[in-house]
Structure formats: structure tokens, C-alpha cells
Image (cartoon, rainbow, N blue to C red):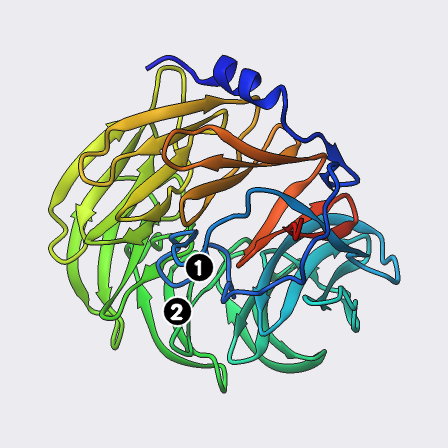
Amino acid sequence: MPSRRDLLATLGAGAVVGVAGCTGRRCSPVAPVGIDWPQPGGGAGNRAAVPDHSLPARVGERWRVSIAPEDPGLLAFAGGVVVDGRVVTAGRTRDGGFHGSVGLRDGDPGTWYVTNRTIAAPPVVVDGGTVLVHQTDTGSTLHLSDDGVEGWTQPLDGSGPPTPRAVDGTLLCGDAGGLLSIDAGPGERRWHREFGDEREGGAVTFSPVADDRRVYVTVTSSSDRGIYALNRRDGETEWLVEGPRASRAPVRVGSLLLVPTEYELLAFDATTGDREWSTPTPANRRTFRSPAGTESGLVVSDGTVLHRLDPGTGELGWSVDAETVGRPIVVGDSVVVSADGAVVAFELDDGSERWRLDRTSLVAPLANGVVVRREDELIACTACEN
């Protein structure tokens, strides 16, 4: 199918040009309405989808605030999540890291907390506390912070573990040797499943995903490589597909487990592990990112192109070209994604452009808009009343 780039350029000729991060037409943006987005990918299945809402036809800037009001020297923004009427963010600074929260309704920056430990992953909010991955010269640790008060600490094996996955008060976190299940309340280990052999452990490089019964983990070491479905209660294997080497975190959607690997996206029956379909990346593309959506409609980026994806067959539909395309988020009948230095909303049905916010990057969706970042500022862009 030919690219839609020329079509979108035509459609965008009369579109609103981004001004100060949001639309330039007359707009009275409404108060932001939050959703439950406590971790990257939204939930335990990493679907990056908000099926019960839709992006507005137009958005305007409701508020903006400095990510770190006390200017600790932002070097890298780790990420942000939306939960309990606030935007929780974290980042890396010259001297370590910081985290804090912004009031969603009015942009109140609240209190920011600085640490001398490097923050190595986006924040995850579980049971009201913020879980952070800290990296040190000697390894990594998992920390719980509750309004700046340090809670439990859990050491991890390896210097760069993936972001933990939260599900029903449990944290699932990979490391260089296996997978940890942690009770998020006291921070105690429930079980630790090791992979690999005595000489080399089985590295869990990407965040696992979970459903009501299982946790799905991709193991990528030379001694043990494949896709495991483990019982959430005790970590015992329910099924195993040996061989595939994941290149991104898996996604659990509908009846499927979707696993990006080099040059193709694999779909397995989540109950049995049987392969349902595989979709190769287009020519000269090395890998897909983690797809996003529901059983009604999926989208996937290969880094420079955004594709519609049929969840039943894996067939690629419409596509939109760009120089760079991040991981998309599906919001009802629309898609929002960071692309070419802007946050762009597309129609899920045909890929036509709905609006764009220039010189911004996507942080998290809202029920009536998005939270975006421009350099060291967070901006809430919401539906226009007029």
C-alpha cells in the first residue's frame, strides 16, 4: 500500500499550526480529566490503549509547569504517568535524579524530591507509592517512595534492569538472572524465577506483561532464549516457546501475546503458546516497537513509519511516514504518537491527521486530551469548549 504522507500533507494544509505547544485557533480548553495510567503502557498488559475515551477534535493549552521547579539540572526525562488526579514524573540530573508530581487539574507543581542516585527507568505508581529503579556503580535497586519518604529497597541483579510491571499490588521485575515477584506493600519477595544455567543466567531485558492468571516474560541470553508463560502465583512454567529473541517488551491483548523480534512481529495464543501469525517488518526495517491497541484495532511503529495492524491476521493496513516515530497510544477511535518532534493525533480508521502539537513529545494520555513535554516543561492540552 502506498504511503499516506502526501495525502496527510494535503489534509494538514488547513490544519491548526501549533503555537506554544498547542493549537493556535481560538480555544477555551476545559479542565483536564485524568485516567488510570499508573505505568508505561497503561496497565499490566502493556496495551498502551484507552478504549473507553476518544481524543478531542481540537485541543488547547490548559496549563504548563516546569518539570523540576528547583532546577536540579535536567539531563534526561525518564517518563510520566497519570494517576489519582496527578502527573507523576521522574528524571535524571547532573547529580543523580528527581521525582515529583503535578496536580492534574491546575498544574500545581507540589513538592519535588531530589536523590543522589541515578534514576534508570520511568516511574510506576502502585498502591499510592512511587516505585523507582535506581542505578549505582555496584548495580541496581528498586525503591518505593511515598511523598518523598523512602520506603523499602529491593536489590536487583544487573546494572540496567527494565521497568517493573505492576499488577494487583504485585511488582514483576526482570534482572540479569531471572524474574522477581515482589509484594508492593512491604517490598518482600514472593518468588524469584531463575533462567539460564549455572554459568550464565537468563537475562530478562524487557518488562514482562501479565493477565489474571499468567505473567509473560521474554528471556534473551545465549544460554536461554525464548518466551515463557509463568503462573503468577508461584512462577512455574505453563508454556514455553524456545528460540525467539524479543527486541521490545511484549503486549497482551485480546487472546494474543504479541512479541516484537528482529524483522518480524510474532503473535501467540496467550493460553497455549501456539503461534497464530507473524508479520515481517517492511524492507530495510530492523524491528517493530511494541504495538498498541485492543482486539478491535492495533497500530505499530517501526521507528520511521506508523502502521495500522489487523489483530486477527497481522496484516498491515494504512501507513504514515515520518523521520522518527515513537510508540503510539490508541485512544478510542484515534491514535496519538510522538513523530518528527511533534505530538500528532491520527484517525484509527484511515490514518488521517486530526491535530498536532509542534515541538513536543508525548508523556501520557488523558480522558480529554494529552500531557506533553517541551524541553523542561510539562503541558496539559485538553478539549476546546468553543
Nearest the eye: 336 or 8: 8
Label 2 element class: strand
Q: Are marks 1 and 2 in contact (CB under 8 Å)?
A: yes
Give whichever of discs 1 and 2 has the lower sequence position.
1
Q: Is residue 358 left or right of residue 251?
A: right
Q: Is residue 349 left or right of residue 80?
A: left
Q: Residue 242: in sight, yes or no?
A: no
Could you tell me which residue is drawn at 33 percent across and 41 percent down?
298
Q: Name which residue type carries label 2.
A: Leu
Nearest the eye: 23 or 151: 23
Q: Residue 77: image x %, image y %?
A: 69, 50
Q: Is residue 125 above or below residue 20?
A: below
Number of marks present in the image shown: 2
Residue designated by label 1: 175
State which quadrant residue 356 falls in. Answer: top right
Residue designated by label 2: 180
Q: Residue 312: in sight, yes or no?
A: yes
Instruction: Using a 10 Å C-alpha cutoff, classify the residue at mark 1 as few (fewer than 14 neighbours), some (14 to 19) or many (20 or more).
Output: many
State which quadrant residue 173 falls in. Answer: bottom left
Nearest the eye: 189 or 250: 250
Q: Residue 36: image x %, image y %?
A: 49, 67
Q: Name which residue type carries label 1.
A: Asp
Q: Residue 71: image x %, image y %?
A: 87, 57
